[in-house]
Amino acid sequence: MKQPIQLDGVEVANDIKRSLADDVKELKQKGIVPCLATILVGDDPSSATYVRMKGNACQKLGIESRKIELPEQTTTEELLLQINMLNNDEQVHGILLQHPVPSQIDERAAFDAIAIEKDVDGVTTLGFAQNAFGFAHYPSCTPAAIMAILDFYQIDIEGKHAVVVGRSPILGKPVSQMLLNKNATVTTCHSRTSDVSSHVQQADIVVAAVGKPEFIKGSWIKEGAVVLDAGYNKGNVGDCDYEGCAEKASAITPVPGGVGPVTIATLLKHTVESAKRNHLS
Ligand code: NAP
């Protein structure tokens, strides 16, 4: 049986990080330390793990990470106040509000309070729109990571049929827009799509962004399709049935070690770019 190409996210992430090391050095020589502020509201253990992973990655590259931890019962007003303080802090170059926030918080208002110059995860309405037009400085990190993997492995996008399963504002929708901007023909599936499998069966490129373990089955995959699994579920399981999909795919991302590490590297890249844009331009 022919094995698919493993789209190795760790390799792509290392490539991104290598190219950032010089930028960080140059900034530090000018007395500037790139700084990412992460805001964690509440005590969801997975969110805490994600924030910790991002902080560790910053530290390894010499980027400062400032962790803001707010209690579960934080109000929208209290969160907006915190975001405004970070907006006004010249030493902070990127702000990441860890999603999801507790239900009493108006998440859209909180995301939109982030200054566009510091919106390194493309979560503001303006950042989202700029991405749709194709000129965002900082598209959402996971969609950008998926595009970076396709680019690194020189996978053709133009003219291909891409099927994205999921339409969240941080993942499914922006990656659909990015693929469209690269001249793919894009189908975006969601929870009301009837017969998702029939759409996936047509795809040259499949993006799984559904948040359900092993939702996409090998039998849905067209022979030779490229499969990018953004899913990250309990027990290190993706949104695709890896073994089944790998039997049909020409190339596939593993979970873990696929989209995840590239997402973090992209966040670092956007933070360093923001520091450069703020201080060197
Ligand atoms: P989300 O906000 O929960 O969105 C899930 C999407 O899947 C929604 O658009 C939903 O449709 C759709 N969906 C749900 N059930 C479906 C079904 N039966 N058929 C078709 N579509 C269905 O999740 P998310 O934040 O986009 O994350 C998606 C996955 O990516 C999760 O596994 C998450 O852990 C992972 N993730 C990974 C990274 C990374 O760095 N690797 C970053 C972010 C997220 P509706 O819109 O109709 O509800």
Image (cartoon, helix red, strand yellow):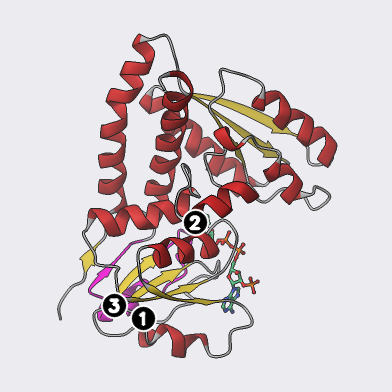
Is 146 placed above or below 112 here?
below
Of badges 3 and 2, the one in the foreground is 2
Q: Residue 164, how many percent across, how many down?
A: 46, 72
Residue at image coords 43%, 48%: 263
Asked if residue 147 is among those painted magenta in the image, a careful observer would answer no
Magenta segment: 229-254
Q: Residue 243, how many percent across, how many down?
A: 32, 75
Local secondary structure at mark 2: helix
Figure quarter occupied by ligand 1: bottom right
Whether tag 3 and tag 1 are in contact, CB under 8 A, the answer is yes
Three-letter amino acid code at disc 2? Phe
Numbered circle sitting on residue 133: 2
Mark 3 Cα within 10 Å, few/some/many (few <14, many 20+)? many
Mark 1 Cα within 10 Å, few/some/many (few <14, many 20+)? many
Mark 2 Cα within 10 Å, few/some/many (few <14, many 20+)? few
Asked if residue 243 is among those painted magenta in the image, a careful observer would answer yes
Q: CA distance from mark 3 to mark 2?
A: 27 Å
Q: CA distance from mark 3 to mark 1?
A: 7 Å
Residue at image coords 32%, 18%: 25
Q: Which residue is mark 3?
A: 225
Three-letter amino acid code at disc 1? Ala
Q: Is residue 33 left or right of residue 92?
A: left
The C terminus appears in which quarter of the rendering? top left
Local secondary structure at mark 3: loop
Q: Quadrant of residue 153?
A: bottom left
Three-letter amino acid code at disc 3? Ala
Comes first in the chain, label 3 or label 2: 2
Q: In this orientation, does residue 35 appear?
A: yes
Residue at image coords 51%, 58%: 132
Q: Residue 213, how many percent across, how many down?
A: 51, 70
